[in-house]
Image: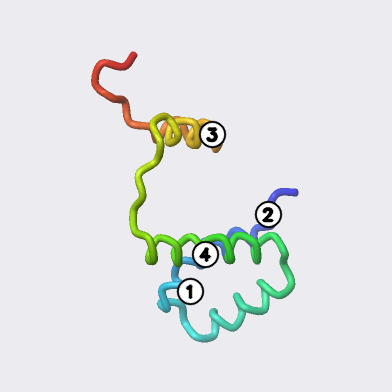
Amino acid sequence: MPPSKRCEEWLGRISLYLDGELAERLCWELEQHLKECLDCHVVFNTTRRTIELYRRYGRVSMPEGARESLFRALNLEDLLREEPGSE
């Protein structure tokens, strides 16, 4: 099921919330939404955990080819940079 318009709005504010930059009233509203919406709750927890892991371990290099495979699996091929000599 595609996310509702309301979910899209909240998902767009998760970063602000996690960075402590979201207004207090909106924080409370987001927290209420997360209690009721499992999909948004999953995205929120995944984002929060990803940030925690990055802060703990920093940037870790990926095995050769893993980045390209991941981007293709997520349909993000347009974000892959063309490497010199590849066509």
Marks 3 and 1, how far apart in space? Answer: 27 Å
Q: Secondary structure at mark 2?
A: loop
Residue 78: image location, x then y, percent: 42, 31
Residue 60: image location, x then y, percent: 36, 50
Marks 4 and 2, how far apart in space? Answer: 21 Å
Which residue matches tag 2? 3
Name the residue furthest left: 84
Residue type indicated by callout 1: Tyr
For the point 60% across and 60% down, the residue is 43
Mark closer to the observer (4, 3): 4
Q: Secondary structure at mark 4?
A: helix
Marks 3 and 2, how far apart in space? Answer: 18 Å
Which residue matches tag 4? 49
Q: Secondary structure at mark 3?
A: loop
Marks 4 and 3, how far apart in space? Answer: 23 Å
Is 2 situated above or below 47? above
Q: Of the residues under marks 3 and 2, which one precedes in the sequence?
A: 2
Residue type indicated by callout 2: Pro
Residue density around tag 3, few if under 14, some if 14–19, many if 20 or more, within 10 Å: few
Q: Of the residues under marks 1 and 4, which one precedes in the sequence?
A: 1
Q: Which mark is residue 60?
A: none
For the point 45% across and 67% down, the residue is 52
Q: Of the residues under marks 4 and 3, which one precedes in the sequence?
A: 4
Q: Is residue 84 left or right of residue 48?
A: left
Which residue matches tag 1? 17
